[in-house]
């Protein structure tokens, strides 16, 4: 089983880290069997599974529910739970309580918090009670109203300096890794070289210590939504649509099920299913 120490060791050995999201047992089982290093039960659950406009409405109960299912399949990968909006921002106690729920109820091995200096003290607190933390800076989806949408961060000198300071603060607070999202690759490279903890990029270029994507995006299950940083490795959404349409047509035309797909054993004058 991959541990936090293993992830740190990969950085030292310059081995790339692989990470993907999962929200249910079947997907988590596939990712785990494929040998993915980190499975994140992301608050992207809101957009991908629950149909919300963004991640903000996602609750702790929803995250726990899905993380429980994922944990039953993640036998080798390091499982991380994404702390949803307002599950940690309000107070140290609330942060510790909800992170503890992730560990105790859902079986995750670490949690992820968005933010820089503003969450450093909370990271220290969680480390103090034995809960490993992954940080997240740059484009932080829980702050989309502040950013005015999903916009690339770190495009001017002031924001570059702020992101650098946030990343350093997170490392100093004791995070074991940090997600860099939606920033120029040159900035991501600078942060990666400056930190001793691994950087995991999403829309942050090739120089991070690892990469993460939303699994449904790389499988082509997000419709027309395709950010620049997503590479589609399959068009599963189109394949599913084709299969379901064919099934619908076969049922409507009476060609499914066929006699060969039906039970034939007879008892007396009745045909029974067996």
Image (cartoon, rainbow, N blue to C red):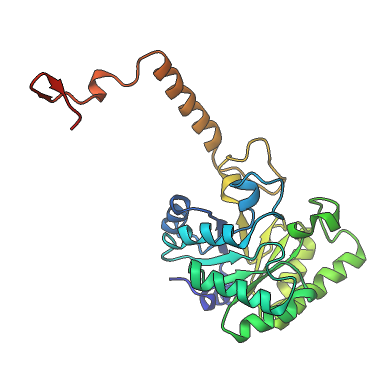
User: Can you say whether 252 is above or below 20 in the image?
Assistant: above
Q: In the image, is 6 to the left or to the right of 52?
A: left
Q: From the viewer's side, name the closer residue of 49 and 211.
A: 49
Question: Which residue is outermost to the left?
Answer: 268
User: Can you say whether 175 is above or below 149 in the image?
Assistant: below
Q: Position of residue 94 (x, y in %)?
A: 67, 74
> Does residue 196 show up?
no
User: Can you say whether 225 is above or below 167 in the image?
Assistant: above
Residue drawn 49% across the image and 69% down it: 105
Q: In the image, is 3 to the left or to the right of 138?
A: left
Q: In the image, is 45 to the left or to the right of 156?
A: left
Quarter holding residue 132: bottom right
Q: From the viewer's side, name the closer residue of 19 and 95.
A: 95
Q: Position of residue 195 (x, y in %)?
A: 71, 76
Q: Position of residue 99 (x, y in %)?
A: 60, 73
> Does residue 179 show up?
yes
Q: From the viewer's side, name the closer residue of 164 and 39.
A: 39
Residue drawn 42% across the image and 55% down it: 29
Question: Which residue is outermost to the front?
Answer: 269
Q: Tag count in the figure?
A: 0
Quarter holding residue 221: top right
Q: Position of residue 17 (x, y in %)?
A: 57, 65
Residue drawn 61% across the image and 52% down it: 45
Image quarter hosting the C terminus: top left
């Amino acid at each position: 089983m991959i541990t936090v120490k293993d992830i740190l060791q990969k950085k030292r050995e310059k081995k790339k880290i692989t990470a993907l999201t999962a929200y249910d047992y079947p997907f988590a089982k596939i990712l785990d069997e494929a040998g993915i290093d980190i499975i994140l039960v992301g608050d992207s659950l809101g957009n991908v599974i629950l149909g919300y406009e963004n991640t903000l409405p996602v609750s702790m109960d929803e995250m726990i529910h899905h993380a429980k299912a994922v944990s039953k399949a993640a036998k080798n990968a390091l499982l991380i739970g994404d702390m949803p909006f307002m599950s940690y921002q309000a107070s140290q106690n609330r942060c510790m309580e909800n992170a503890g729920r992730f560990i105790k109820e859902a079986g995750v091995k670490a949690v992820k918090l968005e933010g820089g200096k503003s969450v450093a003290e909370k990271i220290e607190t969680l480390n103090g009670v034995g809960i490993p933390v992954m940080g997240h800076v740059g484009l932080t989806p829980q702050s989309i109203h502040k950013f005015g949408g999903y916009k690339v961060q770190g495009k001017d000198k002031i924001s570059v300096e702020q992101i650098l300071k946030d990343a350093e603060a997170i490392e100093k607070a004791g995070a074991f890794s940090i997600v860099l999202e939606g920033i120029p690759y040159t900035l991501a490279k600078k942060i990666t070289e400056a930190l001793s903890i691994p950087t995991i990029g999403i829309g942050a270029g090739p120089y991070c210590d690892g990469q993460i994507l939303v699994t449904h995006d790389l499988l082509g299950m997000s419709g027309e939504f395709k950010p620049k940083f997503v590479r589609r490795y399959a068009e599963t959404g189109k394949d599913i649509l084709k299969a379901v349409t064919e099934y619908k047509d076969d049922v409507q035309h009476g060609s499914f099920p066929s006699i060969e797909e039906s039970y034939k054993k007879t008892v007396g004058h009745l045909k029974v299913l067996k």
